[in-house]
Image: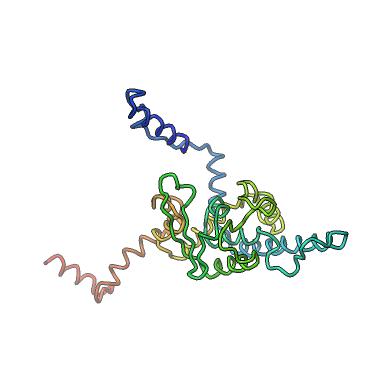
Amino acid sequence: KRSFDALCGLLAHAAERDVIPTNPLARVNLQRPALNDDDLAEQASQRRYLEPDEVKALFAGLEAYQQEKREQRRSSRAHGKAYLPDLDHVTYVDHVMPWVLTMYYTGFRPGDITGLRWEHVNLAFKTIRKTIEKTAHHHAEPMTFPLSSAAAYVLNVWHEQQGKPKSGLVFPNPQSGKRFDRTAMQKPWARVRTLAGLPDELVLYTLRHNFASQLVMAGADLLAVSKLMAHSDIQTTIQHYAHLRPDHTRDIVETLVKQTPNATQETLPALAVVSTNA
């Protein structure tokens, strides 16, 4: 889609400069490619939420990952590498656990966590204000997202552990100090998943779907969820998550009953007669 938009922009510019007579794509809309059965099955498996036992397994897997890293570091320090930092006295052995927990508690896309900067984070007010990378090309205005107490705690601890920086990447590559590439979390996530005993279908993006799904199933308003997910259109939220609350529309129409005085089974027929006569 980005390539198509770029081409449209180029042709529009050429038409304005009379390089070409008209923009041939001016009224062309890009069609979403049809998915085959395998694609649909894979998409459905990834757009799922975590069951309660899977949530427990995830957190246990993260702790197991940390313990494994600590044991490896103890071994290295005991065999001639005492110069390496001791991991037994820090909360997070590396970026992996706080990175995963930040995604779990915010529902951010992986790219928005990878590109998250301390300038975006207000720990005092528990908010993140940043431009969403996926939609930055047509919506550059920063958006503000509230942080739950759990998300704020994770980022607070990580901030202190990193020396309380005022700027820079929240999760920089420890070797280069630069931004991680988009595949950097695949290997550590696979290790966490293995230690947790979770199925391979649980990709990192599942945490984003879990965030939205759990909110919807808890009764959150779809518009609020749409804003937290930074969806450009609420229809995206409805399409992906409204089915998790089949009683939502029923709840809405029931509000009329609650606002009607004396609307009991016995009085409803009488109320209907009054309404008809009126």
Name the residue located 30 percent from the left edge and 72 percent from the top edge. 258
Corner quadrant of residue 96: bottom right
In the depicted view, which residue is nearer to us: 84 or 60?
Answer: 84
In the depicted view, which residue is nearer to us: 139 or 165?
Answer: 165
- Furthest-right residue in this view: 79
274 vs 208, left or right, is left
- Furthest-left residue in this view: 278
- Furthest-bottom residue in this view: 262
186 vs 215, left or right, is right
Question: x and y percent of residue 151 in the render?
Answer: 55, 66
Question: x and y percent of residue 250 in the render?
Answer: 36, 62
- Eyeballing the image, is 43 above or below 25? below
Question: x and y percent of residue 94 in the render?
Answer: 69, 60
- Eyeballing the image, is 253 above or below 142? below
Name the residue located 49 percent from the left edge and 61 percent from the top edge. 128
- Eyeballing the image, is 112 above or below 3? below
Quadrant containing the C terminus is: bottom left
Question: x and y percent of residue 125 in the render?
Answer: 48, 69
Name the residue located 61 percent from the left edge and 57 percent from the top edge. 171
105 vs 21, left or right, is right
In the depicted view, which residue is nearer to us: 71 or 261?
Answer: 71
